[in-house]
Image: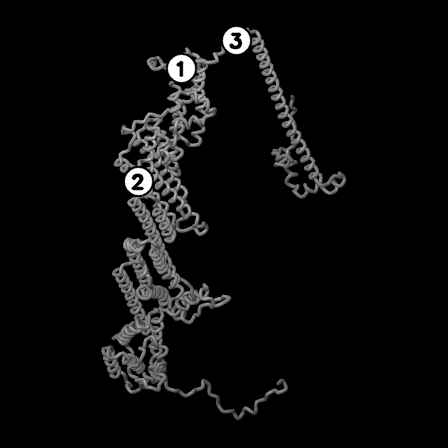
């Protein structure tokens, strides 16, 4: 069939056709230009128009040409597709015609062969008349042929029946049938070496089987191949851990019959096959649970919140259950098949004894499973046309495999059996130990680990293993569970340590470089008066999360724990609380070993907890050193006094915040008590953090007092022309005392601790304030000293040395002052007026004032009531001038 080449129109891209896309290549510049100008909307409009006049009216020439080229391309593509389709159909017709001709020729040859066979048959002479036997006797030749046909039928039926038995996994029956077929083949194929034996019945009739029936040899070659298949399939069936002990015994007897394996060897084969099964189960379980969760940059495993955890736990549980089931069933099957007890013989030995004795009516034979109650008669009865096999001689119909019960190959020594089973158990236990540690690594919480451990213990307790084997498996899984718990705790400790370091660094950076509002929110004073948001709920339910958060916020507000401080401490306290919950889960186990295991876990975990606490203390100490360096750099660099104070305040805020962290950890925080350290280690850690806090407080005290003294020295006294007789302490002293009081409250100390620090700080301040470099000698200095003396009197007799120092300084000023009597000592009134401002610096009760029974102001004003002062107006109005009435006022506009 000639093919005409078709010319395809060219388009710049693929155009859709009803039978598929056609890919064309653009060559014409005109079409390329048309492609760029025509839009998909215009093409749809053109395709909907059928009137040529309307077409040329609504569209340009280029668009019409482009549409024409598109239609031509579609038509050519259809032609090409039709041409290809017609070619394929023509080719199919040629092939079909060729096949028809070939079939016709073959049919003709068959018909010719049939005609030739018919002619050959018709040309033969008539058959001789049949020789009939006498009425009173049997034909011995016919009987010989019938016996021979029964033998040959067994060989012919054996392959199909062997296949069926193999498919049904009846390997012991298949092995027996194979041995029976072998006996039949030996009877048919007698060599010259066996001429001394009694001849078979067909040999007496002069029938040579090897010469006249070559089918026997070929059929035996077919049957003989089943021996290797039966043994291979029986060996492979030993790997299936779900196989019953009866089937295992059947497979092992197959190996004993066909391969003449001794029973100890069959036991080794069974254990080796189960070891391979166990290894494959371990590998498959590892592959099924090998999807590790993502890792953080620091290398710690985290849980992916998007993936449900139930899938991983279920996979681990299934893997453990499968391997345990395979291990337990292997041990149980081995004992049921090979172990001999005082009350009964082993299953495989019982079958061999019954095979050797052939006593189907005995009680032992009846106690065996149905699949093991085998005899030659039962096998022959299952074959097709089983009545025909009644012609077989009794030696074949009652055939039994040769079993020598006195031979060592038909028995297993109990010591050897226990040794082999123990070695297999130990080797599989080691492999299981490695796999279990990998599987348990998929569990991310203590609840998952301990729940799986409890389930495994139930499985092991319900099994039929011996007690020592149960104990070994329980110890294995307990050790794996403990190791996983410790690894989870170690990861939590590492994460908590890293989070604490990150949060602490972020907090100090925020206090140093953050906006002023952020630093203000971290202040305990501001936080105390900043009420948390009210909960929003439909009803006051005690278990509502919003009310719980509100309650927790109030508790934090009462103890002065700001949000920034709480975010830093929560990284450690949450870890400690999680540990306590985990320990509660461990102690909540129903088994008796829970408490001892919890004690063991705590003992093994304690070094890690101690290391984590040391890391926390080191992190805090490093942060303190860095803040001290930053603060030292701001004080040693040459700035203006105001800029130096701002820079120092930034570093000072960070140092104060670190002091609050150290104070919380050493006093109210339950971290060291709940993290799992020993009692001595916990006290030692608290002592170290307390020492660090004292170091920070000492640094704070020194910096605060030194800055206030420098600030005092930076002020210049008033000129003599503006001098006046003072009656109160100087504003510089008041500002310094207010700074100390506010800064002391910013430390967030407890009331008792704050009182002690106020005493120490105020003592240092007084000593530095009136030091030798104080060059002020006017009456204002006497007022300042008098006020400081009043503060010192509140702490007598501990401050006797300070009082003597102030008295000496007062005497010195009286001697140097030109007007020693030009000032009034009103320090008591000033203290009463300023006792609320200086509350952080004052003791709770004044030792110089005794509380009266009816005086209720002592609790609110312990240092006396402020003196009353007359009201003084800020403006004084003069009398009306005499000329006021002479002023001209335009009243018309009012």
Query: Which of the pair 168/96 is nearer the observer?
Result: 168
The crowding category of the residue bearing disc 3, from other C-alpha atoms within 10 Å (few below 14, some 14 to 19, many at least 20), is: few
Query: Which of the pair 629/48 is nearer the observer?
Result: 48
The answer to whether the residue labelled 1 contacts the one labelled 2, judged by CB atoms less than 8 Å apart, is no
Q: Is residue 888 above or below residue 617?
A: below
The residue sitting at 35% across, 42% down in the picture is 328
Picture quarter with the C terminus? bottom right
Residue 159 horizontal/vertical position (percent): 44, 24
Real-space CA distance between mark 3 and mark 1, rounded to the nearest whole angstrom: 25 Å
Q: Which mark is residue 201?
A: 1
Instruction: Name which of mark 3 and mark 1 comes first in the sequence.
Output: 3
Picture quarter with the N terminus? top right
Q: Quadrant of residue 648?
A: bottom left
Residue 716 horizontal/vertical position (percent): 34, 76
Residue on which the image places disc 2: 425
- At numbered mark 1, what does the secondary structure look like: helix, strand or loop? helix
Q: Which mark is residue 129?
A: 3
The residue sitting at 27% across, 28% down in the picture is 406
Residue 695 horizontal/vertical position (percent): 28, 65
The crowding category of the residue bearing disc 1, from other C-alpha atoms within 10 Å (few below 14, some 14 to 19, many at least 20), is: some
The answer to whether the residue labelled 2 contacts the one labelled 3, judged by CB atoms less than 8 Å apart, is no
Q: Quadrant of residue 335?
A: top left
């Amino acid at each position: 069939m000639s093919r005409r080449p078709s010319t395809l129109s060219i388009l710049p891209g693929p155009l859709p056709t009803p039978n598929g896309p056609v890919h064309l290549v653009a060559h014409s510049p005109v079409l390329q230009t048309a492609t760029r100008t025509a839009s998909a909307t215009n093409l749809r409009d053109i395709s909907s128009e059928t009137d040529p006049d309307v077409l040329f009216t609504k569209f340009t020439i280029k668009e019409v040409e482009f549409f024409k080229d598109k239609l031509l391309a579609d038509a050519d593509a259809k032609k090409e597709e039709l041409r290809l389709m017609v070619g394929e159909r023509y080719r199919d017709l040629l092939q079909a015609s060729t096949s028809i001709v070939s079939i016709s020729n073959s049919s003709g040859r068959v018909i010719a062969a049939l005609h030739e066979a018919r002619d050959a048959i018709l040309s033969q002479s008539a058959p001789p008349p049949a020789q009939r036997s006498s009425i009173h006797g049997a034909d011995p030749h016919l009987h010989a042929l019938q016996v021979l046909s029964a033998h040959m039928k067994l060989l012919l039926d054996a392959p199909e029946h062997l296949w069926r038995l193999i498919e049904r996994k009846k390997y012991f029956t298949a092995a027996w049938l194979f041995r029976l077929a072998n006996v039949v083949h030996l009877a048919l194929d007698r060599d010259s070496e066996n001429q001394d034996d009694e001849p078979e019945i067909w040999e007496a009739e002069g029938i040579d089987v090897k010469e006249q029936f070559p089918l026997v040899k070929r059929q035996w070659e077919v049957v003989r191949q089943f021996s290797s298949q039966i043994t291979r399939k029986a060996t492979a069936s030993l790997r299936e851990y779900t196989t019953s002990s009866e089937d295992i015994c059947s497979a092992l007897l197959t190996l004993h019959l066909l391969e003449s394996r001794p029973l100890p060897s069959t036991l080794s084969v069974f254990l080796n096959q189960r070891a391979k099964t166990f290894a494959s189960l371990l590998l498959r379980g590892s592959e099924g649970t090998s999807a590790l969760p993502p890792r953080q940059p620091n290398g710690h495993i985290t849980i992916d919140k998007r993936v449900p955890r139930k899938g991983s736990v279920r996979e681990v549980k299934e893997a453990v259950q499968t391997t345990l089931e395979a291990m337990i069933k292997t041990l149980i099957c081995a004992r049921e098949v090979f172990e001999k007890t005082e009350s009964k013989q082993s299953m495989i030995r019982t079958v061999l004894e019954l095979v050797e004795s052939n006593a189907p009516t005995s009680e032992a034979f009846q106690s065996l499973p149905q699949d093991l109650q085998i005899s030659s008669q039962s096998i022959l009865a299952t074959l097709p046309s089983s009545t025909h096999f009644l012609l077989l001689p009794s030696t074949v119909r009652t055939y039994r495999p040769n079993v020598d019960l006195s031979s060592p190959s038909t028995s297993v020594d109990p010591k050897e059996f226990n040794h082999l089973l123990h070695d297999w158990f130990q080797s599989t236990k080691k492999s299981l130990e490695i796999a279990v540690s990998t599987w348990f690594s998929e569990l991310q919480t203590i609840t998952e680990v301990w729940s799986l451990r409890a389930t495994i213990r139930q499985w092991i307790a319900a099994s039929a293993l011996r007690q020592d084997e149960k104990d070994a498996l329980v110890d294995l899984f307990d050790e794996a569970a403990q190791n996983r718990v410790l690894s989870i705790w170690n990861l939590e400790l590492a994460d908590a340590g890293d989070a604490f370091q990150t949060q602490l660094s972020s907090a100090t950076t925020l206090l140093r470089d953050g906006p002023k509002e952020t630093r203000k929110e971290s202040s305990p004073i501001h936080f105390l008066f900043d009420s948390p948001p009210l909960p929003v709920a439909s009803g006051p339910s005690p278990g509502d999360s919003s009310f719980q958060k509100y309650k927790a916020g109030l508790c934090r507000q009462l103890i002065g724990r700001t949000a920034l401080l709480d975010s830093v401490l929560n990284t450690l306290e949450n870890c400690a609380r999680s540990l306590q919950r985990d320990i509660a889960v461990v102690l909540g186990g129903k088994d008796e070993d829970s408490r001892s295991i919890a004690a063991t876990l705590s003992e093994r975990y304690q070094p890690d907890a101690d290391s984590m606490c040391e890391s926390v203390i080191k992190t805090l100490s490093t942060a303190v050193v860095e803040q001290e360096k930053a603060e030292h750099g701001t004080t040693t660099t040459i700035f203006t006094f105001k800029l130096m104070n701002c820079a120092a305040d930034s570093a000072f805020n960070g140092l104060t915040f670190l002091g609050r962290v150290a104070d919380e950890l050493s006093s109210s925080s339950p971290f060291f008590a709940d993290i799992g350290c020993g009692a001595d280690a916990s006290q030692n850690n608290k002592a170290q953090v307390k020492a660090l806090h004292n170091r920070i407080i000492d640094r704070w005290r020194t910096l605060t007092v030194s800055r206030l003294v420098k600030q005092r020295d930076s002020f210049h006294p008033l000129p003599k022309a503006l001098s006046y007789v003072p009656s109160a302490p100087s504003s510089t002293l008041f500002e310094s005392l207010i700074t100390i009081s506010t800064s002391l409250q910013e430390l967030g100390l407890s009331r008792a601790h704050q009182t002690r620090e106020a005493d120490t700080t105020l003592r240092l301040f007084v000593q530095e304030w009136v030091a030798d470099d104080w060059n002020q000698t006017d009456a204002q200095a006497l007022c300042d000293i008098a006020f400081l003396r009043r503060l010192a009197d509140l702490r007598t007799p501990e401050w006797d040395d300070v009082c003597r120092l102030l008295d000496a300084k007062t005497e010195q000023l009286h001697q140097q002052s030109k007007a020693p009597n030009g000032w009034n000592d009103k320090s008591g009134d000033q203290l009463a007026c300023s006792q609320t401002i200086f509350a952080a610096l004052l003791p709770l009760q004044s030792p110089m004032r005794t509380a009266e029974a009816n005086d209720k102001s002592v609790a609110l004003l312990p240092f006396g009531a402020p003196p009353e002062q007359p009201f003084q107006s800020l403006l004084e109005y003069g009398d009306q001038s005499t000329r006021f009435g002479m002023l001209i006022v335009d009243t018309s506009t009012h």
